[in-house]
Structures are given as structure tokens and as C-alpha cells.
Amino acid sequence: MIWGPLLVASAACYAIKLAGLSLPQRFLEGPRVQRIIPLLPVALLAALVATQTFATGRHLVLDVRAAALAAAAVAVLLRAPFLVVVVAGAATAAVLRLAL
Amino acid sequence: MFTGASQFAFIGVVGAGGNPWAGAAAAALLGTRNALYGLRLSSLLDLRSWRLPVSAQFVIDETTAMTIARDKPAEGRLAYWATAIALFSLWNLGTLIGALATHALPDPKVLGLDAAPPAAFLALLAPRLRAREPLAVAVAAALIALVALPFVPTGVPLLIVAAAVVLYGIRPR
């Protein structure tokens, strides 16, 4: 069930890279393409942060994950490395669950 | 699949109980930026014969950043392959360790592991927010996703957000 979508997604991700390396430059030079492509990861990552912090399944919830995200944001603002940001988020959630 | 944000997105959708195809679509959409990286790298790398299909697998944020930062093409190619080999081996080793270790954990919530992915996404997102437009797009995308979430299947908010970005990008100005 999960392997079909996984293989298709993997093939798509590889094909996108191959296309970027091999297509003539003009295919990706349109101003609209140039504008949309850098904004896609920004929008999708922001949507992932929001939905994985403030939702469980299809229900909006406010729990310790919000505090964990705030801790991660502080780590980001302090220019902490990637792993430190992730650990700051996870540790905050774990400690708060123990305390509450 | 060797492109971190796409891997996280796929797992995020599936782990939240969403349709795996929605996860696959989100992963592919997150991977589109690699096409722009490839375009940038195509003039810097040696892509004759078999090198093209092999090189393609390693076109990601980090390899692109390390390669285009060099002044000489030879140094750029060295940077590309050094980054590619280091990241590919360590990233997949870490993934394997994670996959094996989770079986030893009774409840991932005790370690706060459910809070780790949003923190990781935030860390990936932050460097892209240094201008006003991406910051506004990020805030709007988060709000759209949360508003849509109760009404559509899990994972679909991501596709709605992607569609909104495309509409925003193609609007006349």
C-alpha cells in the first residue's frame, strides 16, 4: 500500500533533479517559474510546521508541541545548528510532558 | 529518494494517517526546487555519459550551496562530490539507525519525538525567510493549512497550499 506511492515519489524526485541538469536552460527561465519554484518549499515547509504542531489527525489542538516549536524558534534565532534546533524542540516537549 | 524535506514531508503525511499519494505529491512538490539547482549546476559539473544520471541523485540544497561557492570549476566539482559522498552516506546511515532504534522505544512521545519534525521543518525553513515576500508567503501558507485541515483529508492541506502558491506566482502584476 505504501510502497507504490513511495516508489513513485522517489522516481519523481530523481526525475526532477535529472531534468534540471539536462533540460535546456530556457525551460526554467520563465519569470513565473522562477518566482513559483523558490516559494514552493517555503510555503510547504511552513504548512508542515503548522499542521504538525497544531493538529492531531484532522483536529486542531494546542498542546506541548506549541511550546516545543517556540523553543526550536529560539534556537533558530540564536543560529543554532540543525541538530540542536531539533533536539531543543523534542527535549522541550519531553520535559513538559514529564512536568505536566 | 535523497532530498530531506521531501522525505520528511512524505513521512509526515503518512505518519499523521494521511493518504500516501498525498504524501507522494507533497514530496515531489518539495523536490521541484532541485530542478533550479540542477540548472545552476549543469554548467559547473562534468556531466558526460554516465556522470549525468549518477550526479543527478545528489542535486540537493547542500551540494548546490557548496559547489556554487567555489570560484574554480575543478574546486566546485570536488566540493560537489565531497559533499555528496559525506551527506549521502551519513544521512542514510542515520536513517537506518533511526529505523532500527524506534523498535526499541516503547512510546516516541516520551522523548518528544513527535515535536522533532516540526522543529526540523522550521530549521529548514528559517534560512529561506530573509526577505519580506517569503516570510509573508510562509505565514499565509501556515494559516491556509490550518484553516483547511479540519475539512479535507490529512495531507491535502499541503496540496491546497501548493496550489495557492502557483496561483500567487502566475497572477498578473
Image (cartoon, rainbow, N blue to C red):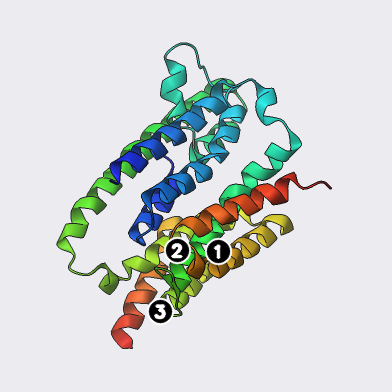
> What percent of the width, then of the height, locates residue A50?
51, 66
How packed is label 3: few (under 14 Cα within 10 Å), some, or many (20 or more)? many
Q: Residue B123's spot in the image, x, y percent?
A: 50, 58
Amino acid beneath label 3: Val
Q: Position of residue A52 (x, y in %)?
A: 44, 65
Query: Would you place residue A21 above or below residue B90 in this image?
Result: above
Closest to the observer, A26 or B144: B144
The circle drawn on residue B145 is: 1
Answer whether labels 2 and 1 touch (C-beta < 8 Å): no
The amino acid type of the residue labelled 1 equals Ala
| Chain at numbered mark 1 | B
> Which residue is the site of mark 2?
B118
Q: Residues within 10 Å of mark 1 (few under 14, many from 20)?
A: many
- Do dots 3 and 2 share one subunit? no
Count neighbours of disc 2 (C-alpha within 10 A) and say few if under 14, some if 14 to 19, many if 20 or more. Answer: many
Q: Earlier in the sequence, mark 2 or mark 1?
A: 2
Foreground mark, 2 or 1, reads: 1
Q: Chain of mark 2?
A: B
Q: Please identify, in this view, whether the residue under mark 1 or under mark 3 is nearer the observer.
A: 1
Q: Which residue is mark 3?
A: A64
Chain ID, mark 3:
A
Decide: is A51 above or below B63. Answer: below
